[in-house]
Image (tube, rainbow, N blue to C red):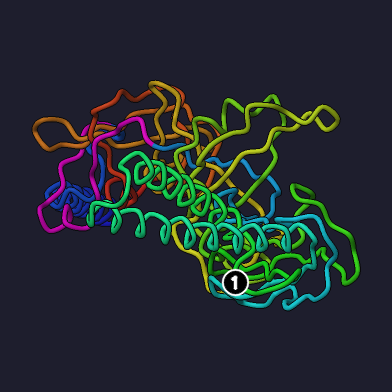
Amino acid sequence: MLRLALVSLALCVIAACGKDESQTRGATGSTAKGGGGTVQLADASRKFLVIEPVSASENPQGRSYFGRTAFRPKALSAMTAPFAGRVVAIEVEPGQKVKSGATLFTIESADVLGLRTTLAQARLKVRTAEEVLARQNEMVKKGVGLEVERFDAEMKAREARGELERAERNAALAGGGQGTKVNVRSQVDGVIVSVKATPGAMVQPGGEPLVEIGDPTGLWVVADVPEGEVAQVAKATKAEVTISALNVTLPGRVAGIAPRSDAETRRTPFYVELESAPEELRAGLLVRVTVFGASAEGELWLPVTAVLLKDGSRRIVYVEDKTGRFIPREVEVGDERGGRVRVLKGLAPGERVVMRGALLVDREAEQLL
C-alpha cells in the first residue's frame, strides 16, 4: 500500500509540473496554443520578427540570353572619302584614342584641285568687281559718272560675292592646304574601332567607311531572344549583365526591342542600357543578360523564410490579425527562385505575414522550406 501511495504522489507531482510548464510557455507566447490555433507573442519576442503585408511583387525568376557589347548607333562615327581619289597616307590605328580635328588619313584628288582653283578665281573676281564698284562710286560722287554704270557695277559685285560664298563652302570640305591633297579629320573624340583604308587604294565619295570611331561612353548590350519570348522581355522591369571577361555583373534596363526578327535564326535583338560601365569596357565582349519581368496580376511571392514545413508536406505561413495574434495558414506554393517562392493559393494581397522569424512563432515546424 505504501508503494502504491508513493507512485500516486509522483504522478500527481509530474502532472502539476507539466501544467506549470505549459502555462509558462503560453505566457511567453513561444509556441502555438491548442496545437495549431492562434499565437500571441510577447513584445520581447516580436522584435525579432519581420512582418509585412503581402502584395504582387517583382517576379524573381529571370530569363537569360547571350549577347555582346556594342556601340550605340549615335556613338559610332563612320568617316568616308569626301572626294574621289587615291589614299596616300593613314595616320591612325585600331584602338588609338583621337581628338576632334585629328588627321585620320590623306587622299590625293583632282577634284580637290578643281575646288581650290574655283575658290581662288572667285576671290579674284570679287576683288575686281569691288574695285570697279569703288571707281564708279567715286566718279558719280564727282559728277562725271553715270548712275546706271554704278548700279551695274554694284550688281556684279554682289554676284561675285555670292559665287565666292559657294566656292568657300565647297572648298571647306577639303579643309586647309594647297594642291591636290586633302586631310580627312575626325569630327569627334573617341577610339578608332576599325581602319579599312589602305595606302594606294582608289576611293569614291559615299563609299564604305574607311575609318570608324566609337565613343566609349556610348556602349550598350545587344542580345537575342527567341521569337516566342519577346513578350516576356518587353515586360522586363530590370536586367543584369554578366561579363565574364571582366568578372563583373552590372545592373541595367531593357531599352528597346528590334522591330524585326532574323529570318534564319528566328531570334529578335533587344537592347540593354547599363546603369554604369567600367572604364575597361569595350565593344565586342560576350555577355549573359538576365532579364526580370513583373509579376502577373494577382501573383504573390514570399521569401522562403516565411514558409514553414509541417507534418512532412504541409506548407504553413503565419498571418497577423487585427489584434496582433498570429494565425497559421496553409498555403500552396509553386516555383522557387532567388530565395523567394511563389504562392499559388492560401493568401490574399494586403494580409500581414511573418516574413522572417517564423520559427519563433512555431517551434514545432520541422524546417524552413
Rendered residue at 30%/35% (across/down): 35
In this picture, residue 260 sits left or right of residue 134: right
Rendered residue at 8%/33% (across/down): 323
Rendered residue at 79%/49% (across/down): 207
Amino acid type, callout 1: Gly
Label the magenta part by its dominant secondary structure: loop
37 and 195: which is toward the camera: 195
In this picture, residue 315 sits left or right of residue 8: right
204 and 46: which is toward the camera: 204
Rendered residue at 60%/48% (across/down): 73
Residue 13 is covered by the magenta coloring: no
123 and 189: which is toward the camera: 123
Find residue 203 and report its image quarter: bottom right
Find residue 63 and report its image quarter: top right
The magenta segment is: 37-57
Measured from the top left, where is residue 297 in percent x and y? 40, 21
Residue 56 is covered by the magenta coloring: yes
- Residue 1 visible here: no
Looking at the image, residue 6 lies above or below residue 255: below
70 and 141: which is toward the camera: 141
In this picture, residue 298 sits left or right of residue 40: right
Measured from the top left, where is residue 121 in percent x and y? 61, 60
Measured from the top left, where is residue 90 in percent x and y? 78, 75
Q: Which residue does the numbered mark 1 point to in the structure image?
A: 176
